[in-house]
Image (cartoon, helix red, strand yellow):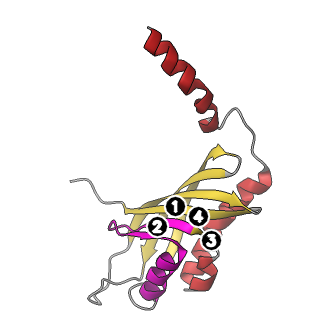
Amino acid sequence: MRLFILLTLACVPSLGCYSQATEKYRADDVQALNNVAQEWERSWNSHDMNALATLFANDVDFVTKSGTWFKGKEATMNHHKQNHATIFKNSTWTKDNVEIKYVKPDLAIIHIGWGMSGDSHHDGTPSSPRHGLSTWVLKKRDAQWLLLAVHNANIETPR
């Protein structure tokens, strides 16, 4: 019983940071977070990697759909620049849905459903259109929401 009480006392204060209902967030932050997804889509589809780079924090962690983990903005952008010159050069990325979960007023998690078409495999053969899900962690720094962590996954048909 004593352990239960101690765990309860330790956990209850931390629960508030995950509750969306108890705190109201500023409409301009909600709009800014949605704008990150819109700018991602615009930058991707115009293959403007300099614009895409402005969405990332310098200390971003980026995990690709195949599980490759890039640490830092430079490594992440080198990967994207190389791929947009090759396998993604004709790709179109569309957001299907955006769901925002606040952790704190300056920290948010976004789950974003996306579609991809027009890309190719590394051997040059065309890829089939597909859908995926990304988890983005964003941190507000100097009044700007920046991607701190990104994890991508293709949605595959269950077997």
Question: What are the residue bounds of the magenta stretch?
Answer: 59-84
Which residue bears the numbered disc 4?
147
Mark 3 or mark 4: name the one nearer the start of the chain: 3
Q: CA distance from mark 3 to mark 1?
A: 11 Å
Q: CA distance from mark 4 to mark 2?
A: 9 Å
* Cα separation between marks 2 and 1: 6 Å
Cα distance in 3D space between marks 2 and 3: 12 Å
Mark 2 residue crowding within 10 angstroms, few (<14) / some (14–19) / many (20+): many
The mark nearer the N terminus, 3 or 1, is 3
Q: Could you say which is closer to the camera, residue 91 or residue 134?
A: 134
Q: Residues within 10 Å of mark 1 (few under 14, many from 20)?
A: many
Residue 142, given in percent of the width and then of the height, sits at: 76, 63
Q: Between marks 4 and 1, how big is the CA–CA gap?
A: 6 Å
Instruction: Residue at 75% x, 40% y: name it.
Output: 24
Asked if residue 71 lies in the magenta stretch, the reply is yes
Q: Quadrant of the N terminus?
A: top left
Sequence-wise, the earlier of marks 4 and 2 is: 2
Query: Which amino acid, mark 2?
Result: Phe
| CB within 8 Å, label 2 to label 1 | yes
On residue 55, the disc is 3
Q: Earlier in the sequence, mark 2 or mark 3?
A: 3
Q: Give the numbered dot on residue 62.
A: 2
Q: Which mark is residue 149?
A: 1
Examine the rendered structure and indicate whether residue 55 appears above or below residue 126.
Answer: above
Image quarter for residue 120?
A: bottom left
The reply to whether residue 60 is in sight is yes
Q: Evaluate if marks 3 and 1 touch, with contact meaning CB atoms under 8 Å apart.
A: no
Q: How dense is the environment of label 4, judged by Cα within 10 Å: few (below 14), some, or many (20 and up)?
A: many
Front-lying residue, 78 or 126: 78
